Image (cartoon, rainbow, N blue to C red):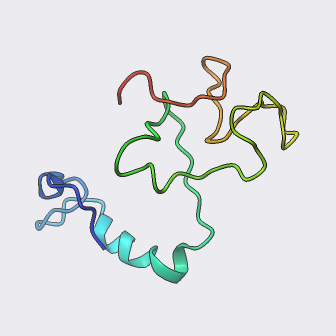
Amino acid sequence: RFPNDANFTSLWGLHDQADKDIDAPEAWRTFTGEYSRGITVAVIDTGVDYTHEDLRENMWVNPGEVPGNGIDDDGNGYVDDVYGYDFANGDSDPMDEQMH
C-alpha cells in the first residue's frame, strides 16, 4: 500500500527505480496488515502536526488520559498527554511549531 501523496513519485529517497533509496514500499508491504498490529512509532523532533491529513487518523492516543481535564489521569507525571508531551515547552501539546 503506497501513500496517497500526489508528490510521492518525487520522493526518490523513499522509492527510486535505480534503487538508491531506503526501499520504503518494500517496508510498507512488510509492516502493514497483520505484522503491523501493535507497532507504535515515536517522533523525537520539534513536534508533530497531529492535524495533518496523513497523520490525524493514524496518531496514537493515550488511552489513559481524558483530554483537557487538567488531570494526570494515567499517573505518569504528565497532565493531559493525549498525543505525547512537549518537553521543550513543558506542556502536553506536542504540535510542531517549527513547521517541519
31 in relation to 41, above or below: below
66 in relation to 12, above or below: above
* Side of 34 relative to 20 (left or right): right
User: In x, y percent, where is residue 1?
Assistant: 31, 74
* Side of 11 relative to 2 (left or right): left
* Side of 24 relative to 87 (left or right): left
Residue under the image location 37 percent in, 70 percent down? 28
59 in relation to 46, above or below: below
Quadrant in the picture for the C terminus: top left
Residue under the image location 52 percent in, 42 percent down? 43
User: In x, y percent, where is residue 21?
Assistant: 24, 59
31 in relation to 63, above or below: below
User: In x, y percent, where is residue 91?
Assistant: 66, 22
Q: Residue furthest top?
A: 89
Q: Quadrant of residue 66?
A: top right
User: In x, y percent, where is residue 74?
Assistant: 84, 44
**Near-viewer residue (2 or 21):** 2
